[in-house]
Amino acid sequence: MSPIFLAVLLQAAPLTCRGESRAGAVAKTMRESVQRSPLYAFAEKTFGAPTSCELRSQKSEDGMELRLTFVFKGAKLVSHQGDAEMSELDLLVPNGFADEKAAIDALKKQLDGDSVHPDWSKLEESKRDDGSVVRLARDPAGDVNISGVLEYQHGKLVQLGEHAAL
């Protein structure tokens, strides 16, 4: 087998998430859903294909809790599914997003795909003890509590995501 063919074959092979087989069909559905998301597409376009994927599951009082992490070069995409009423999808970039506008546009596309339309002109802002600033964009007409979340450290956008508490 030629090295070029092998490289193309390896590049096309689907990423297997460590721990997925122990969590069953729910984990596969979760992984596939995340991989279809606008935030995943943005991460892959910006940072290249993920280098690893891990799924951790544990039983909680309310059922099963799942945390799926895709690691990219310079970023992590983390999906957390708690009980039936809580989910989060966050893209973390410790050195900050190079193109903040494109990152926020990807988050807007993520929220729009879930029929959530936050008012981006009225961000709720809070400061954490570590000095980071968190800005929330909520849908003023929404029947559910789904927010766009932006986190800044030292003036740089380092995390964005969609948080839902139904």
Image (tube, rainbow, N blue to C red):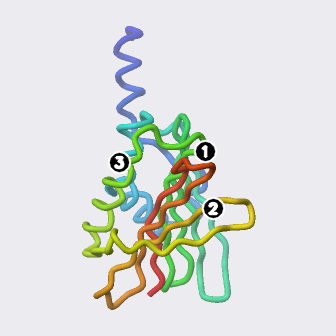
Disc 1/disc 3 C-alpha distance (Å): 17 Å
Label 3, secondary structure: give it.
helix
Q: What's the residue type where badge 2 is placed?
A: Arg
| Mark found first going from the N terminus, 2 or 1 | 2
Three-letter amino acid code of the residue under disc 1: Pro
**In this rendering, position of residue 84 left or right of residue 63:** left
- Image disc number at residue 94: 1
The residue identified by callout 2 is: 56
Q: Going by the image, does 141 lie left or right of 50?
A: left
Quadrant that contains the C terminus: bottom left
Tell me: residue 99, above or below residue 26: above
Q: Position of residue 136 (x, y in %)?
A: 47, 71
Which quadrant of the structure image shows residue 4? top left
Judge from the rendering whether residue 12 lies leftward or rightward of residue 156; answer left or right.
left
At 66% across and 78% down in the image, what residue appears? Answer: 59
Give the SS element for disc 2. strand
Please, which residue is most extreme toward the top here?
2
Q: Disc 3 to disc 2, how far (Cα)?
A: 32 Å
The dot on residue 156 is none
Label 1 SS = loop
Residue 101, numbered label: 3
Q: Residues within 10 Å of mark 3 (few under 14, many from 20)?
A: few
Check disc 2: other Cα within 10 Å, few if <14, some if 14-19, many if 20+: some
Q: Is residue 100 left or right of residue 65?
A: left
Q: Amino acid at mark 3?
A: Lys
